[in-house]
Amino acid sequence: MIKISLLVWIMLGTALAGTAVIAVLAVPSLASEAMKNIPLAVLLGFVAAMPLSYLVARKIGASPLR
C-alpha cells in the first residue's frame, strides 16, 4: 500500500500545490509578497496531500477485485 500511497501523493501533491499557487496569485494581498508566499503554498499543498494520499491508497487497496 505504501507504493500506491507514494504514487497518489506525487499526483495529489502536485495538484494541491498548483491550486495553492493559483490562489496566492489570485489574491492581491498575497500576490504582493509572492516570493515568500509561493514556496509556502507549495509546501502546504504537498504536506496536505500526505494524509489524503494515504486515505486514497487505503480505498484503492480495499476495493475487491472482480
Image (spheres, grey):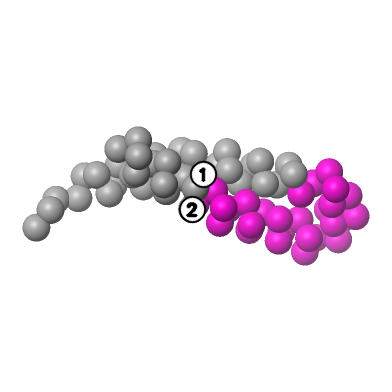
Q: Secondary structure at mark 1?
A: helix
Q: Main secondary structure of the magenta part?
A: helix
Report the residue that reaches farthest toward the right: 32
Pair 1/2: label in front: 2
Relative placement, left or right, of 52 versus 16 is left
Task: Give the extent of the magenta segment.
Answer: 12-38
- x, y percent for residue 32: 90, 55
The answer to whether any part of residue 55 appears in the image is: no
Give the camera-side residue of 6 and 20: 6
Q: Which residue is mark 1?
A: 49
Relative placement, left or right, of 61 versus 53 is left
Per the image, is 14 magenta?
yes
Residue at figure coordinates x 36%, y 47% from the top left: 56
Residue at figure coordinates x 67%, y 54% from the top left: 20
Give the camera-side residue of 19 and 7: 7
Q: Which residue is mark 2?
A: 11
Residue at figure coordinates x 42%, y 41% from the top left: 6
Residue 11 vs 54, above or below: the answer is below
The earlier-in-sequence mark between 1 and 2 is 2
**Residue type for callout 1:** Ala
- x, y percent for residue 11: 49, 53
**Residue type for callout 2:** Met
Q: Are marks 1 and 2 in contact (CB under 8 Å)?
A: no
- x, y percent for residue 61: 24, 44
